[in-house]
Image (cartoon, helix red, strand yellow):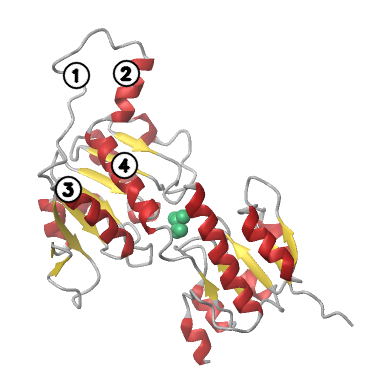
């Protein structure tokens, strides 16, 4: 008798190559909507499955895990996994996979693109033309700040933070960093370590690259924004929840800081009536850090690799809760 294929639910259409690999080995159901599956649909679908391919828009928590008695593995198509209650998964004996490394350079590219776009006011400049304001070469219009020679403060010098630091070196920036705990070296890739407050005071640009955890939730709030230079530019390509959006609005509106460029917001998507969208000195794009064709395909393939390993009872190549194997 033919062995039954494992049942897998994929919460969105992902790269075709990855779905082909899954289909070859599993009985796969893919949610076809362009929006995430509603919670009740997800909770119903997980009842029968052996493996779940999730996105950062899907909440994987105790409630979901309890409803999925056969679940052997959850594979998130993202490096971040703040959508998943990892402790609960570990308690349930379920390994969680993520996609580290492969989106590092693509995300660093976007962080640098945002940094440059904010420095040189590209969003405003584009609107200036479309609004019919370009009448002549104006010696005083749309003046930005220089990138070369400026100090970049990187919060969280992990893979993506380091990739941003490499780009900054090519632009003759001075780089400092914070985070990583006291075990971190005083110099990393030519960047001097600073306490967060010092970094905020010293930097012309601040770029956030730490994960969202209970410790980093609203890490950048009123007090921290108050430490920054009035010309400083804040770039966030990590997670929206790391910056308090009300405090950020006030700081931008009152010109306590110069500019913000955000790939991530709290909440996501940002509401259209969010006051941040009324500000000229705030540039916002819709969480596209890893959005290149090649990188999104690599992420999907890595997620499938994790999932298939988990279904076979093998160790996931990229597991965020390896302690699950010590149980
Ligand atoms: C991630 O992987 O965590 C990004 O936010 C989306 O690619």
Q: CA distance from mark 1 to mark 4?
A: 21 Å
Residue 9 horizontal side relative to residue 292, left or right: right
Task: Residue 50: give its label.
Answer: none
| Pointer 2 or 1: first along the chain | 2
Judge whether 221 appears above or below 194 on screen: above
Question: Where is residue 96, by image quadrant?
Answer: bottom right
Mark 3 or 4, which is nearer the eye?
4
Evaluate if marks 2 and 4 touch, with contact meaning CB atoms under 8 Å apart. no
Task: Residue 113: give its label.
Answer: 4
**Label 1 neighbourhood size at 10 Å, few (<14), some (14-19), many (20+)?**
few
Q: Residue at x 74, y 74 (%)?
A: 6
Residue 61 seen in the figure: no
Q: Residue at x 54, y 83 (%)?
A: 315
Mark 1 or 4, which is nearer the eye?
4
Query: Which residue sits furthest right?
Result: 1
Q: CA distance from mark 3 to mark 1?
A: 27 Å
Evaluate if marks 2 and 1 touch, with contact meaning CB atoms under 8 Å apart. yes
Tag 4 secondary structure: helix
Q: CA distance from mark 2 to mark 1?
A: 10 Å
Residue 316's x, y, as percent?
A: 54, 78
Mark 2 or 3, which is nearer the eye?
2
Give the total number of marks visible in the rendering.
4
Residue 64's x, y, as percent?
A: 64, 69
Q: Which residue is mark 3?
A: 226
Q: Which residue is mark 1?
A: 141
Residue 77's x, y, as percent?
A: 54, 61
Q: CA distance from mark 2 to mark 4?
A: 20 Å
Q: Which residue is mark 2?
A: 128
């Amino acid at each position: 008798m033919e062995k039954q294929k494992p049942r897998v639910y994929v919460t969105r259409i992902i790269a075709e190559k990855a779905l082909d690999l899954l289909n070859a080995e599993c009985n796969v159901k893919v949610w076809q909507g362009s929006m995430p599956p509603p919670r009740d649909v997800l909770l119903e679908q997980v009842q029968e499955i052996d493996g779940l391919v999730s996105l950062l828009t899907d909440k994987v928590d105790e409630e979901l895990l309890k409803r999925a008695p056969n679940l052997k593995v959850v594979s998130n198509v993202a490096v971040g996994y703040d959508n998943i209650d990892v402790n609960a998964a570990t308690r349930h004996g379920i390994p969680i996979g993520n996609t580290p490394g492969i989106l590092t350079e693509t995300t660093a590219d976007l962080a640098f693109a945002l940094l440059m776009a904010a420095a040189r006011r590209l969003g405003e400049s584009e609107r200036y033309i479309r609004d019919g304001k370009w009448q002549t070469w104006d010696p005083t219009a749309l003046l930005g700040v220089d990138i070369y020679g400026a100090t970049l403060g990187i919060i969280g010098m992990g893979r993506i933070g380091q990739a941003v630091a490499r780009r900054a070196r090519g632009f003759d920036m001075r780089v400092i960093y914070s985070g990583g705990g006291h075990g971190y070296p005083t110099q990393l890739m030519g960047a001097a370590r600073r306490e967060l407050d010092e970094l905020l005071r010293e930097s012309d640009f601040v770029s956030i690259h730490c994960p969202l955890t209970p410790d980093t939730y609203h890490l950048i709030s009123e007090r921290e924004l108050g430490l920054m230079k009035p010309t400083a530019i804040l770039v966030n390509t990590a997670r929206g929840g790391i910056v308090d959006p009300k405090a950020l609005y006030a700081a931008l509106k009152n010109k306590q800081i110069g500019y913000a460029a955000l790939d991530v917001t709290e909440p996501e998507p940002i509401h259209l009536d969010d006051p941040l969208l009324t500000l000229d000195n705030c540039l916002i794009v819709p969480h596209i850090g890893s959005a290149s064709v090649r990188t999104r395909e690599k992420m999907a393939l890595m997620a499938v690799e994790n999932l298939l390993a988990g279904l076979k009872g093998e160790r996931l190549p990229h597991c965020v809760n390896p302690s699950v194997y010590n149980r």
